[in-house]
Amino acid sequence: MGIDGDKVVFDRSSILSIDNKPFSAESLDCKLSYINEDNQVQAISEFVLVLPQNESMKSEIEILLKESKASSGSQKTDEVLSYLKDFYGKAIKSNVSSWLALHFGVK
């Protein structure tokens, strides 16, 4: 887990391992906490971290892109973002754009 500006960045491989042994999960109940100057723990947020399997999500997106009437890469990205929000939760547009370019050549 790391910080990128105002975002908390989760690394799947470090989250889904205990004693350097991987395990699988599709979602995790998470709590973010902050230790203040007095060394007291303050809760910041509770949420469910959704971790879809890359291959199954690729299959879903492939079907979506085949059925899409969108012509530009930007429109396709917006459609995928909408789909992801509906089924997995909010995604970061730049991450989705990079992922679509890598796996589907969408630019």
Image (cartoon, rainbow, N blue to C red):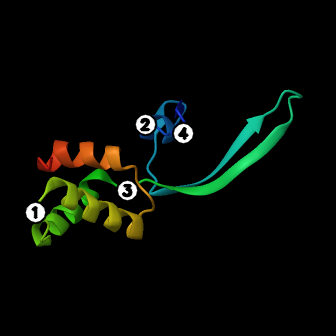
Q: Is disc 2 placed on a helix, strand or loop?
A: helix
Sooner in the amino-acid sequence: mark 4 or mark 1: 4
Tell me where residue 75 sits by quadrant: bottom left
| Tag nearer the camera, 3 or 4 | 4
Are discs 1 and 3 less than 8 Å apart at CB?
Answer: no
Sooner in the amino-acid sequence: mark 2 or mark 1: 2
Given the image, on which type of amino acid does mark 3 rest? Pro
Are discs 2 and 4 less than 8 Å apart at CB?
Answer: no
Whole-number angstrom distance, CA of label 2 to CA of label 4: 15 Å
The residue carrying mark 2 is 13
How crowded pointer 3 is (Cα within 10 Å; few <14, some 14-19, many 20+) is rated as few
Sooner in the amino-acid sequence: mark 2 or mark 3: 2
Sooner in the amino-acid sequence: mark 1 or mark 3: 3
How crowded pointer 4 is (Cα within 10 Å; few <14, some 14-19, many 20+) is rated as few
Given the image, on which type of amino acid does mark 1 rest? Ser
Residue 87: give x, y in percent of width and height.
39, 69
The residue carrying mark 1 is 71
Tell me where residue 74 sits by quadrant: bottom left
Q: Residue at x 53, y 31 (%)?
A: 2
Sooner in the amino-acid sequence: mark 2 or mark 4: 4
Q: Residue furthest right?
A: 38
The residue carrying mark 4 is 8
Residue 45: give x, y in percent of width and height.
68, 51
How crowded pointer 2 is (Cα within 10 Å; few <14, some 14-19, many 20+) is rated as few
Q: Nearer the viewer, residue 12 or 68?
A: 68
The residue carrying mark 3 is 52
